[in-house]
Amino acid sequence: MQKIMLKNPVFLKDISIKAKRSRMAVSLFVINVLASLVAIFILFISNAGMVSMDPMDLQAFTWIFDGFIIVECAFVCLMVPSETGPSIANERERQTLDVLLTTKMSHFDIILGKYLSSVAYTLLLLVSLLPFLSVVLIYGSISFIQLVGVMLAVIETVMYLSAFGILYSTLVKKSSRASASALAVVFLLVFGTIFLCLIIHLIAAAANSGNYYNGRIFKANIFNTGDFSFFLLYFNPATTVFDVLDKIVGFDIFSDNYHGMAGIIAETSSVLTPDNFFVKHWAPVGFVVQIITAFYMLKLSAAKLAGNTRRVKLGKKNNN
Amino acid sequence: MLEIQNLTKSFGPFKALNNLSLSVNDGELFGFVGANGAGKTTTMKICVGLERADSGSIIIDGTEALDPKGRSSLRGKVGYVPDFFGVYADLTASEYLHFFAGAYNIWGRDADILSDNLLELVNLSDKANEQVDSLSRGMKQKLCVARALVQNPKILFLDEPASGLDPKARHELKEILRNLSSMGKTIIISSHILPELIEMCSSIGIINHGEMKFNGSIEDALALSAGGEFIEITFSGDPGRALSLIKECPFVTGAELTSKGIRVTANADDAEYTALLKKLIVNDIPVATFSKNHENVEDIFLNIMEGGSTNAENNA
């Protein structure tokens, strides 16, 4: 990976340009100020507990950590489209794309350079937040390994969503529209897949009106194909982050026996069991699905970039 | 070096290139002339692989450029300067060239040397560490030419490189291109201003509405203006019956009033012109000047564009 990055001129150029711009410094400053305020708030709460000599509620710290990660993921959902959307579109607007396409770099290398620089930039902002996340480590409510596990899930989410941003950057000519389209796709992935899953369940339940009218729309015993729409949620990065977060740190809100997506599925599905391999290992399977999808999106972006220059009828005589 | 045969390209119902054929010899500085929208940029974009053709053939240095494999192998042999600057404002001139050196897999010390040499070639050595944004238009264009030379191409396509440059920058650019031509590079340079190209090119191609109207040497193009000789007569007073007197002469093929006086076209020798002048004076016409002129290059360009006798047609 290091070799790919250090030998990719587009990556090096983009990182160099980003480092020169004030936007990076301003972004780091704003994000860290906001995170500082949250950290100060956490410290204030914990100190208040110590002053009153009440026993410290470590569970509360895990909730704060969970909240911090959710905010960070929301930040990723907003940050990634604004970062990746303009990447290729900007080259097009600046009229440098044509020149780039005439070089010896393959289209996939160009796309990869853009993708890696966008991912690296977003990750830099996230890494700068690590010290604030680590505040909860002081009180021992989560371990360093837990922190690393959750951060890996967030990093994977950045990599997954960035690939969609890059694709829309190649599909849409204007950078602002590309960002808006990428943002819309992120929302579709996060909320749209859940909505679609619900709709499929409702349709499945409606097919069995008896089940529909008794109110247990998710427990359609006769027509259960709707349950398989749960697998659509593999494409939803929120489910994989939730699965990791609930299993590693814990929300403990859905099921006493099962954590993560298995807990939700135990509550809502009659066909899929929490012990099903794909349910039990939701996060790892989800990561594989999302990384393969991201790779395919990048390949698609490269193909789109090459689209205008491929099909040629060689040597055909035109008699017009 | 470059052989284009029956190149055709349409954008929807609009036919941008219609059976366009042209050839450019090795080491030639070729001027590609045409009005805006004539098809120059489309031709160049197809040659460098940025646009696809509907049909035809482009052979560059013995390789079929429309074949994906051929195009890939030509990437190191072809340089392209588009009709816009295409520079990254946040990079320095040196960083800009280093970036493109990396795009051709040239790294480290090799890239440093290459960048220094190219900046020296285009007289920008003193601007190496300046932001591209701070360079003048002419300097940016020279930097673009330097960028197109990173891979040491055999053939260079320059799309309207002098457009928008001041006279000094134009002159400097011409000098750079002459220098490159003397280094044996084949250069195809497009413009819609023929006089600009005639000064430095060894051959030209004139394109109109996607069709090649002329492809040949500058001398051949100027020879087409042989029939463009005319007499311009101005008067110090009322020319009176001058126009009818001129038209009476059997060797006069055309005469028309202009803002300056009368423009006469004729198939005549000097003795017959003398006879015409005598006739006007004998008839008390107040002739002020009587001069033999040739059409200028712009007129030649327009004549060829409007469908006059063309070398391209003769060659077909």
Image (cartoon, rainbow, N blue to C red):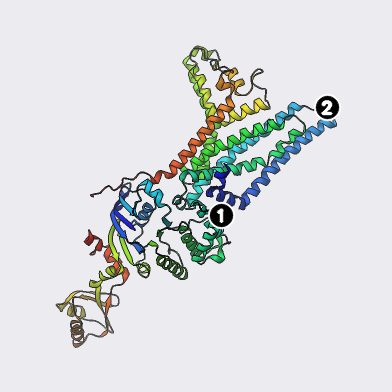
Q: Nearer the viewer, residue B213 or A45?
A: B213
> Position of B77 compared to A21: left or right?
left
Marks 1/2: CA–CA distance: 63 Å
Which quadrant of the figure has residue B207?
bottom left
Percent from the top left, x then y, of residue B209? 30, 56
User: Is disc 1 placed on a helix, strand or loop?
Assistant: helix
Name the image quarter holding the C terminus of chain B: bottom left
Name the image quarter holding the N terminus of chain B: bottom left
Percent from the top left, x then y, of residue A299? 47, 39
Above-or-below relation of A195 to B63 = above
Q: Can the viewer see residue A295 in this picture? A: yes
Disc 2 residue type (three-letter): Asp
> Position of B28 compared to A219: left or right?
left
Residue matched to label 1: B108
Residue matched to label 2: A54
Chain under numbered label 1: B
Disc 1 residue type (three-letter): Gly
Q: Can the viewer see residue A83 in this picture? A: no
Residue depicted at 62% across the width and 38% down the height = A75
Chain under numbered label 2: A
